[in-house]
Image (cartoon, coloured by chain):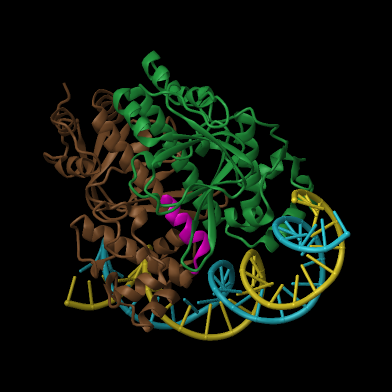
Chain colours: A brown, B green, C cyan, D yellow
Amino acid sequence: MPIQISLDRPISLDRMVERLDSRRPLGAGARAALRALPATVRTLDPGAYMVREGDRPVYCCAIVSGFAFRQRITGDGARLILSIHMAGEFIDLQNVYHDVSDHSVQALTRTEAAFIPREAVRAVADVFPDAGIAMWRETLIDSSIAREWAVNVGRRGALARIAHLLCEFALRLETAGLGEECDYRLPMTQEQIADSCGLTAIHVNRVLRELGRRGLIARDKRAVHIVDWRRLVEVGDFTARYLHLGSDDAKLI
Amino acid sequence: MPIQISLDRPISLDRMVERLDSRRPLGAGARAALRALPATVRTLDPGAYMVREGDRPVYCCAIVSGFAFRQRITGDGARLILSIHMAGEFIDLQNVYHDVSDHSVQALTRTEAAFIPREAVRAVADVFPDAGIAMWRETLIDSSIAREWAVNVGRRGALARIAHLLCEFALRLETAGLGEECDYRLPMTQEQIADSCGLTAIHVNRVLRELGRRGLIARDKRAVHIVDWRRLVEVGDFTARYLHLGSDDAKLI
DNA sequence: CGATCCTTTGATATGTTTCAAGCTTAGTGG
DNA sequence: CCACTAAGCTTGAAACATATCAAAGGATCG
């Protein structure tokens, strides 16, 4: 019944389906149903909203290319960025079941996003338990990352917070096959890094410089080169466990 | 096939089943299967572990009475408490699908906990999609709370953080039918409050006093009386949306 | 009724923010 | 292709919130 619609160009959800399959092996029915989900692809400029806090969500989003971030704004206007998302990730599965979205998601870079009616996603989850469970696992990992970020922001110093962010981004990029672990472009302004770490942009600037001075990283504009991965991991108190990458959980301690 | 086992005394999972049903209406099959889950009830002293970070989880836990908390420890020994849980809540559903637990859960007070083999929970989720989805929703709300705590710790001042904690606890207690919104016992030491808010115990002490001085709360030992709910909500920048209590989401703005 | 854990208080230290301003880069229109 | 503009980055000095150190007073529980 669902027909694939595409505004800009035909799009395949293969990458997302593979990702779900890695969380929980999918049966043929589930795979087919997921592939057949009706997706509207839109190209978004940086800052464009995919979901807005307070919305009654109608669509569920997946990133085809580019980067996105979640955020919440406090009563007095401060922002916290809650996570970064990259190509191949569903960023919105929680809104399949929430009636009102409790945070916003915005494009970080120019981003192609697939908008899928949430009722269609719900239908797949209802009919194919394995698909539902794969999506569940995906949201569980999101949740684990959120907790790690809370720890980062709540109990680590500024240097560690930023080192941790750099490590997480490096590893996720590499795992997703989207870049080199030790040489990548961090698509964030220093202000966005600040809002991810509960700091100010000014302090982020000083800390980045300090990380450079200590020989842990080298930067050129937004390009990050990790010079000393071991020490960066140490300074950032980074462990990969919370990412639940599967494999051995112990790739790097 | 599952038989109910009980170490201390027979226990019913009714409260948990009702909670899941409120997330997603359960069919007769799902209800029966959930009720029939094999549960071992154990009474835990404060501080006793239900799950330990790094464990390969075998059981999934639900709280029958008392309180529990999640926590993570950083590399240099600092602790962040990630959430508080109360009677009727499953605290461990994420471990049904994670192979290694990424954080610990401990009893906060003397607590009766039901230990259910995770394979049994998994089986119910596999066979009864509505049960699986109800559990999924439960973990989604957990995740939403984790994000709110990250915001609390990352972008609010000490006064707001603690006020926010007091509001959340009040509202959840009341909603769960476990206490009065404006008059309850907060089962935490000041050090535990500190670790929930990313502060030191000493500063928590001063802030609690300040909240009293401003006429927002009154305390007697660990009993909390909320004198001015409106202003406490305002100071704590508290909105209930992230709790996804259903109803209207707007009970208090 | 002693011991331990928790709370309270004061003084000082520190990491991070705030304010202020100059500089660089990328984008835009003439 | 240049001039202009806006956004982002960098730097310094001062202010502030919270942490740390130190120690005493209460509560709770064998």
Is residue A135 something one can see in this rendering? yes
Side of B10 relative to A12 (left or right): right
- Magenta: predominant secondary structure element? helix
Q: Position of residue A138 (x, y in %)?
A: 31, 42
Q: Nearer the viewer, residue A181 or A11?
A: A181
Residue drawn at (38%, 82%) of the image: A214
Q: Position of residue B165 (x, y in %)?
A: 62, 46
Q: Residue furthest top?
A: B28
Q: Is residue A56 visible?
A: no
Q: Quadrant of residue A252?
A: bottom left
Q: Quadrant of the C terminus of chain B?
A: top right
Which stretch is magenta? Answer: A146-157
Q: Residue at x 35, y 23 (%)?
A: B130
Q: Nearer the viewer, residue B31 or A172?
A: B31
Classify A106 as above or below A174: above
Of all residues, the one furthest to the left in this rendering is A10
| Closer-to-camera residue (A190/B131) | B131
Q: Say left or right for A104 vs B208.
A: left
Q: Is residue A61 above or below residue A69?
A: above
Q: Quadrant of the N terminus of chain B?
A: top left
Residue located 33% across and 54% down the image: A243
Residue B188: x percent and y percent?
66, 48
Q: Is residue B127 left or right of residue B6?
A: left
